[in-house]
Image (tube, helix red, strand yellow):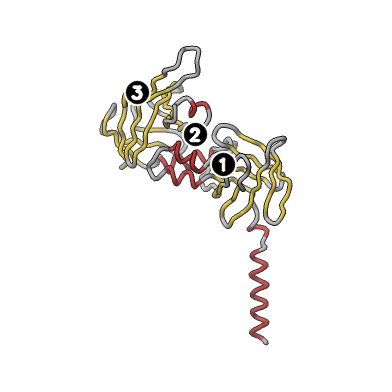
């Protein structure tokens, strides 16, 4: 009898834990860690973002009934309509809505007519107060995809150690003090399927095409083949640097 009572109490306790509201809470910042992990295996960034995108980051505030996301090109604000059986409906003011749900430690975005199912992980990186939507994904990507030390094998500054910082600063690459990777939008459509980045020094910079192959990173000049009155169209030009991950 005592054994049966103990089992009943244990089942009740476990049932209470399973229905803990905290386990269903979707508030906070969630990033597309799957896309970051895929890119960080050493392949093209664009391919990873297309395979596991399109959305890169969600920011959810259940108390304010607000949810917003970014795909790297546009930020979309929505309204949480409430929870039902652990799923939260998000309305986007005239466009197709989304459904969000906790799946263990991840946030699941249900498939819709326009987008595939996606999963997101809680952001672990720290961003400054007031940072724009997408900053958490960007910092996590920069740290994972280009983090660590790189050596200039060929090009200006040969032999230098180059470090790409998570906040967009760069050290050791002659002629550049900041960088930004193209994730989506106009910069992506202008490069013909090639990965590209922005390199600048003292606020002035240019677009460069890059190719990541394992531990090697090629940075090439971006040649604009468009007419002066057309949107720029960049193709790979002469290689400027060859970097090797240390």
Side of 77 relative to 245 (left or right):
right
What's the distance in space between the residues labelled 2 and 3, CA to CA? 21 Å
* Mark 1 and mark 3 residues within 8 Å of each other at the beta carbon: no
Quadrant showing the N terminus:
bottom right
Q: Which residue is rendered at x = 56% and y = 53% of the image?
A: 106
- Mark 2 closeness class: few <14, some 14–19, many ≥20 residues within 10 Å: many
> CB of mark 2 within 8 Å of CB of mark 1?
no
Residue farthest toward the front in the current orientation of the protein: 113
- Going by the image, does 23 lie left or right of 194? right
Question: Where's residue 102, x and y in %?
Answer: 62, 54
Question: Which quadrant would residue 66 be assigned to in this image?
Answer: top right
Q: x, y percentage for residue 179?
A: 43, 30
Q: How many residues crowd around disc 1 within 10 Å: few (fewer than 14), some, or many (20 or more)?
A: many
Q: Residue at x 61, y 43 (%)?
A: 59
Numbered circle sitting on residue 237 = 3
The residue labelled by disc 1 is 57
Q: Earlier in the sequence, mark 2 or mark 1?
A: 1
Q: Secondary structure at mark 1?
A: strand
- On screen, residue 75 above or below 87: above
In the rendering, which numbered label is found on residue 183? 2
Q: Is residue 57 above or below residue 4?
A: above
Q: Earlier in the sequence, mark 2 or mark 3?
A: 2
Q: Secondary structure at mark 3?
A: strand
* Quadrant (top left/top right/bottom left/bottom right) for the C terminus: top left
Q: Earlier in the sequence, mark 1 or mark 3?
A: 1
- Identify the residue shown where x is 52% and y is 48%: 124
């Amino acid at each position: 009898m005592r054994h049966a009572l103990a089992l009943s109490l244990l089942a009740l306790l476990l049932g209470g834990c399973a229905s803990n509201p905290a386990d269903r809470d979707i508030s906070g910042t969630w990033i597309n860690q799957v896309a970051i992990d895929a890119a960080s295996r050493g392949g093209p960034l664009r391919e990873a973002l297309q395979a596991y995108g399109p959305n890169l980051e969600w920011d959810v505030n259940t108390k304010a009934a607000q949810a917003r996301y970014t795909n790297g090109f546009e930020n979309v604000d929505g309204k949480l309509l409430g929870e039902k059986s652990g799923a939260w409906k998000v309305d986007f003011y005239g466009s197709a809505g989304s459904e969000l749900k906790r799946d263990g430690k991840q946030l699941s975005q249900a498939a819709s007519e326009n987008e595939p199912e996606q999963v997101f992980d809680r952001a672990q990186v720290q961003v400054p107060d007031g940072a724009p939507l997408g900053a958490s994904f960007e910092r996590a990507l920069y740290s994972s995809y280009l983090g660590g030390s790189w050596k200039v094998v060929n090009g200006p500054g040969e032999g230098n150690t180059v470090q790409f910082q998570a906040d967009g600063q760069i050290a050791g690459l002659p002629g550049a003090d900041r960088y930004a990777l193209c994730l989506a939008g106009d910069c992506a459509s202008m490069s013909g399927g090639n990965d590209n980045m922005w390199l600048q020094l003292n606020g002035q910079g240019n677009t460069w095409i890059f190719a990541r192959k394992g531990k090697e990173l090629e940075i090439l000049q971006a040649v604009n083949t468009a007419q002066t009155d057309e949107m720029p169209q960049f193709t790979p030009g002469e290689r400027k640097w060859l970097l090797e991950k240390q």
